[in-house]
Image: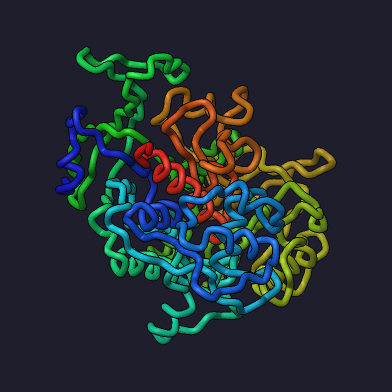
């Protein structure tokens, strides 16, 4: 067990100020901000937005984390619906949406006196979901949009003598960058890997009395009560052995992302051994030579980027593919119809294949068959897949394996009611796109649960360049709450 984790285990009288669940970009950025790294407006810097520039000039000696984020972000527009995300993004990368090359207007000063003790708990290695992505996969976002504060990704790539590919990078480079960032900024002691959190329960402790367990909807009417969370789970080491832990924290930040629980179709046979919901299953099957160019086709269900990545991977190894999806190829909501062709040539190639290579009409792409407007009905033990087209007719095909890549949902089973009581619409489960957690836009604190924060996709932020604004909002909130009144 980690020394720091053990230090706080079972010590409810001296709870840890902050526990962060999730060690991806959101958790890394927040750890950086809570470790005393303090953003100031760089002396002599001029932001291209004149209104924001005037606001920044009003309190040049006050850290951004201590200023009014709502006031600073007022009037900003961009590719995010979060004002805090837009603010931090434009401070770090001014004018980037217009391909500008204006330097960050922030300078960073390490102030140990402003650090807040915290731990970052992650299931896997530091880097979150990036550690589970095939290393050669090309990122959707531009490479320089994947960077974290005070160490640009481009500078790291130059240092490693690596080159961006069409302004984008590989997942392997991104993961190495994040792990280097944690080490370079001295954050390693804050991170604990191999941790599975199984329960987060809120409790109140009245001074001098015993612990009082509290449901998530309890009211904190007594101002002398001390808010606290009990975080329980286990640590799994490389040998597979487990060790339980329990620690107490004043604040908990959810930074788990959305990749824990792949979406299912909910049809017969979906739990058969040859059916999988992760692209890694195809990688393993290729390495084990269970699928190859002479095997039955691999069925890929879905019309998003994960499905496209699987098609590209299979195409690389000359593995035949049947591709089934529910939408029309020209549906405006299809992600391929929203990506610039010049910047994403490989995804444009998959989209061409989807349009031109129908089993009914043929096409130029050998080893690939497209089935638009088809729904999988069931999978049989003999690896036969049954589909239904838009006219209600059924078709059957033999396959070697099935990949169902239709998205994923966050796994918040460690929270009461799996977090549904914290969402915008408490009648439906948590969904990063359709039903995220209901948060204050300038603190990212959950509206229904004080002391519980959510960042990243759980709060509706998807891209690395924007999840950092959530980290800024949380850090600002926590730092302000620790200020001593005059």
Residue at left offset 44%, top offset 61%: 39
Q: Is residue 138 above or below residue 224?
A: below
The answer, for residue 274, to whether it is visible in the render is yes
Task: State the residue lying farthest toward the front.
Answer: 486
Front residue of 347/377: it is: 347
Residue 97 percent coordinates (x, y)? 68, 69
Side (left or right) of 325 relative to 295:
right
Residue 320 occupies which quadrant of the picture?
Answer: bottom right
Q: How is the image coloured?
A: rainbow
Side (left or right) of 282 relative to 196:
right
Front residue of 438/39: it is: 39
Q: Tell me the quarter of the image containing the N terminus.
A: top left
The answer, for residue 280, to whether it is visible in the render is no
Residue 125 percent coordinates (x, y)? 32, 56
Front residue of 412/115: it is: 115
Q: Tell me the quarter of the image containing the C terminus.
A: top left
Residue at left offset 52%, top offset 72%: 317
Residue at left offset 15%, top offset 41%: 7
Residue at left offset 50%, top offset 66%: 41
Residue 332 occupies which quadrant of the picture?
Answer: bottom right
Task: State the residue lying farthest toward the bottom.
Answer: 161
Residue 285 percent coordinates (x, y)? 43, 60
Residue 365 percent coordinates (x, y)? 71, 72
Side (left or right) of 253 relative to 293:
left
Front residue of 98/114: it is: 114
Q: Is residue 383 above or below residue 92?
A: above
Please tell me how many numbered marks the rendered image carries.
0
């Amino acid at each position: 067990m980690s020394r720091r984790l053990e230090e706080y285990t079972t010590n409810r009288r001296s709870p840890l100020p902050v526990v962060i669940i999730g060690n991806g970009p959101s958790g890394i950025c927040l750890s950086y901000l809570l470790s005393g790294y303090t953003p100031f407006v760089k002396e002599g810097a001029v932001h291209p937005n004149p209104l924001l520039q005037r606001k920044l000039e009003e309190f040049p000696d006050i850290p951004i984390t201590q200023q009014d984020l709502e006031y600073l972000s007022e009037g900003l527009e961009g590719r995010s619906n979060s004002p805090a995300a837009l603010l931090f993004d434009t401070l770090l990368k001014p004018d980037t949406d217009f391909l500008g090359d204006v330097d960050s207007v922030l300078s960073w000063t390490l102030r140990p006196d402003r650090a807040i003790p915290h731990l970052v708990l992650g299931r896997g290695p530091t880097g979150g979901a990036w550690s589970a992505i095939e290393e050669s996969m090309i990122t959707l976002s531009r490479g320089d949009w994947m960077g974290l504060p005070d160490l640009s990704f481009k500078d790291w790539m130059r240092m490693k003598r690596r080159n961006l590919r069409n302004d984008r990078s590989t997942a392997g480079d991104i993961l190495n960058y994040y792990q280097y960032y944690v080490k370079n900024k001295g954050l390693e002691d804050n991170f604990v890997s191999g941790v599975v959190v199984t329960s987060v329960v809120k409790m109140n402790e009245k001074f001098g009395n015993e612990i009082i367990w509290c449901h998530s909807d309890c009211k904190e009417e007594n101002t002398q009560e001390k808010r606290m969370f009990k975080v329980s789970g286990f640590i799994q080491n490389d040998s597979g052995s487990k060790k339980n832990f329990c620690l107490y924290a004043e604040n908990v930040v959810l930074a788990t992302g959305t990749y824990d629980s792949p979406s299912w179709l909910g049809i017969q046979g979906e739990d058969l051994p040859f059916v999988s919901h992760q692209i890694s299953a195809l990688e393993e099957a290729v390495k084990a030579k269970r699928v190859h160019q002479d095997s039955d086709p691999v069925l890929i269900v879905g019309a998003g980027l994960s499905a496209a990545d699987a098609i590209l991977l299979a195409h690389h190894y000359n593995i035949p593919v049947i591709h089934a999806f529910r939408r029309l190829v020209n549906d405006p909501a299809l992600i391929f119809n929203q990506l610039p062709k010049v910047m994403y040539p490989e995804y444009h190639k998959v989209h061409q294949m989807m349009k031109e290579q129908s089993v009914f009409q043929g096409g130029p792409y050998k080893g690939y068959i497209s089935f638009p407007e088809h729904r999988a009905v069931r999978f049989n033990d003999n690896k036969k897949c049954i589909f239904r087209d838009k006219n209600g007719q059924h078709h059957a095909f033999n396959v070697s394996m099935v990949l169902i890549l239709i998205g994923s949902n966050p796994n918040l089973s460690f929270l009461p009611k799996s977090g549904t009581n914290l969402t915008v619409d408490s009648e439906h489960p948590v969904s990063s796109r359709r039903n995220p957690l209901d948060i204050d836009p300038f603190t990212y604190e959950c509206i229904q649960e004080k002391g519980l924060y959510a960042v990243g996709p759980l709060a509706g932020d998807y891209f690395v360049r924007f999840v950092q604004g959530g980290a800024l909002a949380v850090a600002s909130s926590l730092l302000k709450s620790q200020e001593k009144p005059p």
